Amino acid sequence: MNTAGCRNGICALPPDQRGFTSVAAISVDSTPLAETIRKYKYDGDGGWAYIFGRLVLGWLNRNAATACSYTHILANPSHEYRQPYRHIERMLSIAAIEDIHRRWPIYPNALIKPEETPRSAGQNRRAKAIAAQQHADAIMLADPPDTPPPLKNAKILLVDDIFTTGAQLDAVGRRLLDSGAARVDGLVLARRSWSP
């Protein structure tokens, strides 16, 4: 998604005033896709990890001219003990396994979130922003052996499931930029239509 065409308030900000430069969406969120992602995320329908992981890898391969500039492809982390599983990490792990030529710098477990934070799903915009900041504040870099190269001057592609308000991508992106990253972009399975 080119942020210039996005009516979302965070996307409307100049890039130097938000935590991400751009967001690419594999699909636009629709009722069937939303239900599938929900089942994968909350109900333990883990087989979707293989499909979603391959979709991420397919996006990287189809957009190689852009994707080759990233030094780090990271999962927006789930809580360390999230049940039924850490869904974004699982999806990105599949993408890494399927990347048999090791073309992409995918580090599914480089970021960890050791404590649970409030969920933003179903909340209003303000509550989502507060939850997003709490999520970002809880994130840490993993200890070896799961760590990628240092974040200083890194160009990061942060992978997540759904882009709604952009508050979480903004907060996590700011956290990564404060840690020395040069640029943060997002890649999501689906983008929700924005209603101001």
Image (cartoon, rainbow, N blue to C red):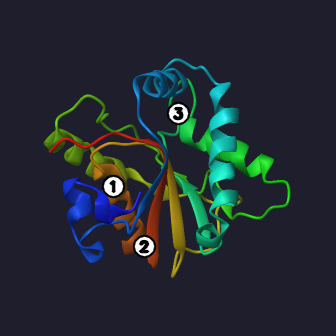
**Secondary structure of residue under mark 1:** helix
Residue 38, percent from left and from top: 46, 24
Quarter of the image that includes the N terminus: bottom left
Q: Is residue 188 left or right of residue 175?
A: right
Q: Are marks 2 and 1 in contact (CB under 8 Å)?
A: no
State which mark lies toward you, 2 or 3. 2
Residue 43, percent from left and from top: 52, 17
Q: Which mark is residue 33?
A: none
In which quadrant of the rendered view does residue 142 lie? bottom right
At x 52%, y 33%, the residue is: 81
- Residue labelled with disc 2: 179
At x 27%, y 46%, the residue is: 165
- Residue labelled with disc 3: 81
Q: Amino acid at mark 1?
A: Asp
Camera-side residue of 195 and 164: 195
Q: Amino acid at mark 2?
A: Ser
Quarter of the image that includes the C terminus: top left
- Toward the front, the furthest residue is 5
Alpha-carbon distance for marks 2 and 1? 12 Å
Mark 2, residues whose alpha carbon is within 10 Å: few (<14), some, or many (≥20)? Answer: some
Residue 136, percent from left and from top: 35, 54
The answer to whether residue 87 is seen in the rendering is: yes
At x 30%, y 40%, the residue is: 193
At x 48%, y 27%, the residue is: 33
Residue 109, percent from left and from top: 61, 51
- Residue labelled with disc 1: 137
Alpha-carbon distance for marks 2 and 3? 24 Å
Q: How many marks?
A: 3
Q: Amino acid at mark 3?
A: Tyr
Q: Is residue 135 left or right of residue 142?
A: left
